[in-house]
């Protein structure tokens, strides 16, 4: 790099061309270039987190832990419950749903999270997971099940979405 009066010249050697490529930049342009490059480098380093299940490094804008996920899930949990008809008003069934779910949560890679399992009134056959440990199953899905193992399998699937932070990962790819 050569420095002149208020200008920098970058000389790039190229094996494809007989001539060197010279890029002339004003000092403020060079500062911007260095700032952008440093920012991108820091963003890449800071944005890499270890997936708790696979152990692989992943790019994640939305934090390195579950704290932000809990806040994100809490922000939408009530709206999801409302949109799907609200919680089933059967305390015995809700306790059973939570009991089966907690058995899965306790052996998950995110056992430190306070998972919440709840049955909703909606007639569609569905189950869903929100970031931070909110897991729902609809009445329509419960009516399709024949035993506790099937319920546990659904909860294991939904718990895995939370454990590997699928929502935060997907949002990071969108930004």
Image (spheres, grey):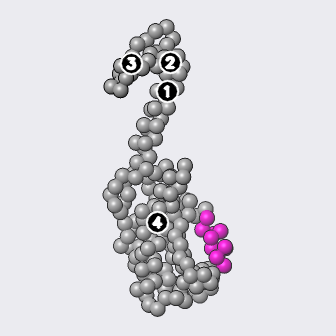
Nearest-to-viewer mark from 3 and 2: 3
The residue that label 4 is drawn on is 162
Mark-to-mark CA distance, 1 and 2: 9 Å
> Mark 2 — residue?
25
9 vs 85, nearest the viewer: 9
Q: Nearer the viewer, mark 3 or mark 4?
A: 3
Evaluate if marks 1 and 2 touch, with contact meaning CB atoms under 8 Å apart.
yes
Between 9 and 142, the one nearer to me in the picture = 9
In the displayed orientation, state which residue is furthest to the top.
5
Rounded to the nearest whole Å, what is the CA distance between mark 3 and mark 1? Answer: 20 Å
Q: Sequence-wise, which precedes: disc 3 or disc 2?
A: 3
Q: Magenta stretch: dominant SS? A: helix
Give the label, 2 or 4, closer to the camera: 2
Any part of residue 62 in sight? no
In the rendered image, residue 1, in percent from the top left (x then y), is placed at 39, 16
- Mark 3 and mark 4: Cα distance apart in space: 52 Å
- The residue depicted at 40 percent of the width and 52 percent of the height is 58
Where is residue 12 drawn, in percent x and y?
A: 38, 22
Secondary structure beneath dot 4 equals helix
Would you name the residue on which mark 1 appears? Answer: 33
């Amino acid at each position: 790099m050569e420095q002149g009066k208020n200008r920098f010249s970058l000389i790039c050697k190229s094996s494809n061309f007989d001539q060197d490529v010279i890029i002339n930049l004003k000092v403020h342009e060079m500062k911007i270039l260095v700032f952008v490059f440093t920012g991108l480098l820091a963003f890449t380093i800071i944005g890499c987190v270890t997936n708790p299940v696979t152990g692989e490094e992943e790019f994640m804008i939305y934090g390195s832990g579950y704290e932000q996920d809990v806040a994100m899930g809490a922000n939408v949990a009530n709206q999801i419950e409302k949109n799907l008809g609200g919680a089933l008003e059967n305390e015995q069934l809700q306790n059973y749903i939570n009991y089966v779910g907690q058995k899965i949560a306790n052996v998950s890679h995110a056992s430190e999270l306070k998972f919440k399992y709840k049955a909703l009134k909606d007639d569609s056959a569905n189950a869903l997971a929100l970031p931070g440990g909110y897991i729902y199953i609809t009445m329509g899905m419960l009516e399709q099940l024949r035993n506790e193992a099937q319920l546990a399998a659904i909860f294991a699937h939904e718990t895995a979405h939370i454990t590997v932070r699928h929502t935060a990962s997907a949002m990071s790819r969108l930004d």
